[in-house]
Image: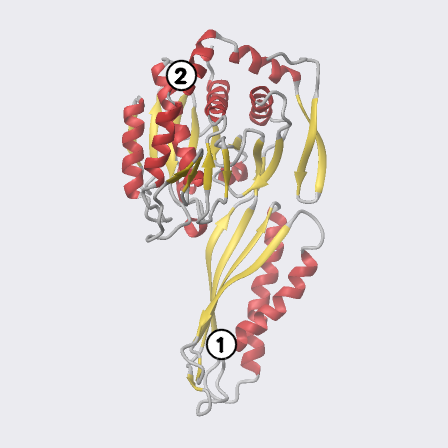
Amino acid sequence: MKLNLTFLLVFSLIIGNHVFAQTIQPKYQKEVQELAKKPAIQKAFDYIIEIDAVTIQDMITLTEIPTPTFHEKEKGIVYADMLRKAGADSVWTDEVGNVIALRKGTKSDKTIVVDAHLDTVFPFGTDVKVKQRGDTLFAPGITDANRALAVVVALVKTMSSQNIRTESDIWFTGSVGEEGLGDLKGMKHLFREGGQPIASFIAIDGGGLEDIVNGGIGSLRYRVTFKGPGGHSYGAFGIGNPHNALAQAVASFVPKADEFTKEGLKTTYSISVLGGGTSVNSIPFESWMLVDMRSESQDKLKGINQIFLESMQEGLAKENKIIRRGEALTVDIEKVGDRPSGIASPESTLIQQTMAIADYLTGGKKPELSSSSTNSNVAFSKGIPAVTIGRGGIGYGAHSLGEYFINKDGHLAIQQALLLVLMQGGWK
């Protein structure tokens, strides 16, 4: 593949509603080309293609293990065994359930992490049996994120079989609690104070090679419960009604949140789940809701959070003001999710390397930088070099029962991950 090294590849970086021109620096394009053309790397590329059928079978095996968030143990055991057989120097499971496989570096001067998450969004009872129709594999969770787990296993196999060692230690992880109310549990533990220092972080969790995540969309999630004595709808009339308080709180919040989110980086809010009450002729003793708020900006997230908390108290006060008898209502505001936001500069070494690799392997297809909510959020928020790259192939319907995967050039994602690990970990 020939590229003009003096050419600056310009593309659009979309953040919220803003578009910025970005470039791939020629020195990174040159480094990628030189690395990829080395005989040892070409041999490794061939090996990745050679084991492709086994990689697909690994993906199927992992997909067919039900893994709702907080229930990753069974899959973690199978995944750990795959990593051992792939040639990792050592494999262990940490205190929260993250599976970690070490490939020691020749210097062990720093630690690079390559991650895929173990959990899926589907509850127990979901049919996760993989079904094939032609070249398409159907199953909930097959792309998010069981394909990514299989990519990591293939990467370890390749480095082991080809005797490729970086200067730095590489941790290959299968993390817990990425989805939903898992709230990045595995990552928060991995990046905890006093934990192993991590020099850079590479998550595999997305689409094609050109889809590069360099920003983390932060989120705050609450379960809000308004509480009262409850009673008969006629006989106890006049006592506080938790449903009324919740409705007043939402009515207070939405207009202010709407105005607040009209300007600046994209910020969102959703009253997502509602519950409470026992029968049509009863005043409920509680009314609850789950609320999700997100932003690419930590400041905007703090701003809408303040509006939300104030609105909850306003709703409570409005209902308590009209109570005719009985005790005042109360509200319990429980934070059930707190994902930090952050961004890696498009000019940073890791992002430049990722873009240059994608450009090379796709034959000049323009990479796109974006923000998303992935395991990289924690590293982004701490200023640690991080990126989320795609799992390759063609996937559709993530988080749906109709999720599917087509293995079209899927090997390129493993090749991309290999090049990025070598560039970050130091290999000559």
Q: Amino acid at mark 2?
A: Tyr
Disc 1 target residue: 242
Residue at image location 63% in from the left, 22% down from the top: 364
How far across and down, in percent of the image, does residue 36 sit? Answer: 52, 13
Relative vertical location of residue 200 with respect to residue 176 in this rendering, above or below:
above
How far across and down, in percent of the image, does residue 170 sit? Answer: 40, 24
Q: Which residue is at the front of the view, 64 or 233?
A: 64
The answer to whether marks 2 and 1 mark residues whose Cβ atoms lie closer than 8 Å is: no
Q: CA distance from mark 2 to mark 1?
A: 63 Å
Q: Nearer the viewer, mark 2 or mark 1?
A: 2
Relative vertical location of residue 144 with respect to residue 199 in this rendering, above or below:
below
Image quarter of residue 211: top right
Assign the N terminus to one quadrant of the image.
top right
Relative vertical location of residue 347 with respect to residue 322 in this rendering, above or below:
above
Disc 2 target residue: 47
Residue at image location 39% in from the left, 15% down from the top: 165
Label placed on residue 234: none
Q: Residues within 10 Å of mark 1 (few under 14, many from 20)?
A: many
Whichever of labels 2 and 1 marks the residue nearer the N terminus, that label is: 2
Q: Which residue is at the front of the view, 188 or 72?
A: 72
Please give left or right for residue 423 compared with residue 176 in the image.
right
Q: Amino acid at mark 1?
A: Pro
Image quarter of residue 88: top left
Residue at image location 46% in from the left, 20% down from the top: 425
How far across and down, in percent of the image, does residue 229 sit? Answer: 41, 81
Q: Secondary structure at mark 2?
A: helix
Asked whether the viewer can see residue 321, the reply is yes
